[in-house]
Image (cartoon, rainbow, N blue to C red):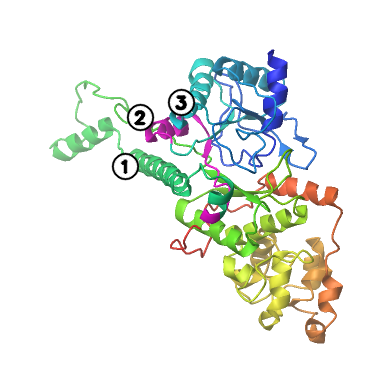
Amino acid sequence: MNLIDKLSILADAAKYDASCASSGAAPRNARKGGVGSTESSGICHSFTPDGRCVALLKILLTNFCQYDCLYCVNRASSNVPRARFTVEEVVQLTLDFYQRNCIEGLFLSSGVIQNPDYTMEQLVRVAQTLREGHGFHGYIHLKAIPNAAPELLALAGRFADRVSVNIELPTLHGLAELAPQKDGVQIVQSMARIRDHIDEAKAAARAWRGLRQKDVPRLQMADAVMDATSDTPASLEVQPPRTVISLPFDRAGRAKPPPFAPGGQSTQMIVGADATDDRTILAASATLYGRYGLRRVYYSAFSPIPDASHALPPVAPPLLREHRLYQADWLLRYYGFTHDEIVTASSDGMLSLEHDPKMAWALANRQYFPVDLNTAPREMLLRVPGLGVRTVQRLLMARRVRRLHVDDLRRQRLPLQRVLAFVMLDGHHPGAQLDAAQLDRRLRTAIAPVHQVASVVALQSANARPAKKQDAAPGVPAQLPLF
């Protein structure tokens, strides 16, 4: 099979993985030699038919697989064309596409062949060859194979910007039903190992920076000692020539520790392949953020596959459900919400498709409104529909010097119809409008056609993070059970 045919098969096989963002990587460029950069200049972004953003060379090393996961198009029993790249072929493809400005890096996953250790070793060899053999400075995202040897996971994080393990499904029951050959415990153990390596690398970097700040040039220290012990004024004493023991700020023996997966780790859940509700999905995500320090959880709406098992739903779930989960995920990570606030125990366990999660929470908790924009704390401002993280920061800075008015919101180009119903400020009070029975209907978001929603989901998946960097969700208790 020629290289073009392999690329056609293995690129198509990788399209179901939504985690294609390259944020969080350490800045690198090739100005001092090598190939590539982690910056997105000159990158060609394309979209798959279901709306996902593809900014990387997303391929599988092979779509041969020993596992027979019912939801996977590449399962062992699937009747699909099979192919396999060699390590050298993946390396050359990555370099060729990068030099043509078609990609910003490599996203590499694989089916499991022979055993997890062998498969993981092949993935690591690709990253190692790119970094050490070709001086590649672009972004590399490796999908770790659960149950692979810890030594291989350590090597993967050394050469890759991001290492991730797919959780696949949010419950152990669902995983046992649809992927009986996969072990949920082994998956989270791999996540824990990656988290430990990341924490160790960060601690080593902090210690190294501390040594740099405390390090005083040895020559200056010698001058201070000699001046303090001399009886002759320093201005009159003839100083003999001194032997330079070390140069100022010499770093001999204090090399900077190597980073480990500076882009962190992420995972992906399949939505709609089983009967798991949104409340359970968000509870699992909250635990992943709090316990394993994940940078991102991706949600992938189940896509019906050829010759599917009767245990799978015959139709795909609404793509809008995937979009609502991304919005709820944003509330977990950046807005101070907890998963049980977003989907309460008294509900049916599903997110509203008519309203975004923040609007749905505001309508269900009108006793907290209206919020006074001139006096309310930041935590409450973040819960106002229509106000984002950056907007709240601007409002907090502005109200330090003057009172806020409606014109200030208008200059921010905010959706005033949504915001003004829940806030009060100089010159405005919602009055009885907040309690009106028709408020729900008036603010109801019209459900967009599927192709429009898909574009929004792709933007969410591009991982355009707010200004404040934050890895774990605020207020998420770490002791929540994963499944």
Q: Position of residue 356 (x, y in %)?
A: 74, 64
Residue at x-position 53% and y-position 37%: 162
Q: Is residue 327 left or right of residue 207?
A: right
Earlier in the chain: of badge 1 and badge 2, it is 1
Q: Position of residue 48 (x, y in %)?
A: 77, 37
Residue position marked by numbered label 2 in the rendering: 255
The range drawn in magenta is 148-173
Residue 430 can be seen, yes or no = yes
Q: In the figure, 256 relative to 190: above or below?
A: above
**Type of the residue with mark 1:** Lys
Examine the image and state in which quarter residue 426 appears: bottom right
Q: In the figure, 88 relative to 47: above or below?
A: above
Residue 171 can be seen, yes or no = no
- Element carrying mark 1: helix
Q: Position of residue 242 (x, y in %)?
A: 21, 22
Q: Nearer the viewer, residue 294 or 86?
A: 86
Residue position marked by numbered label 3 in the rendering: 118
In the image, residue 167 lies in the stretch drawn in magenta: yes
Real-space Cα distance between discs 1 and 2?
Answer: 15 Å
- Tag 2–tag 3 contact (CB < 8 Å): no
Mark 2 Cα shell of 10 Å, populated few (<14), some (14-19), many (≥20): few
**Type of the residue with mark 3:** Tyr
Earlier in the chain: of badge 2 and badge 3, it is 3
- Tag 1–tag 2 contact (CB < 8 Å): no
Tell me, for residue 214, which label it has, or none. Answer: 1
Examine the image and state in which quarter residue 70 appears: top right
- Element carrying mark 3: helix
In the image, which is nearer the foreground, mark 1 or mark 2? 2
Earlier in the chain: of badge 3 and badge 1, it is 3
Mark 3 Cα shell of 10 Å, populated few (<14), some (14-19), many (≥20): some
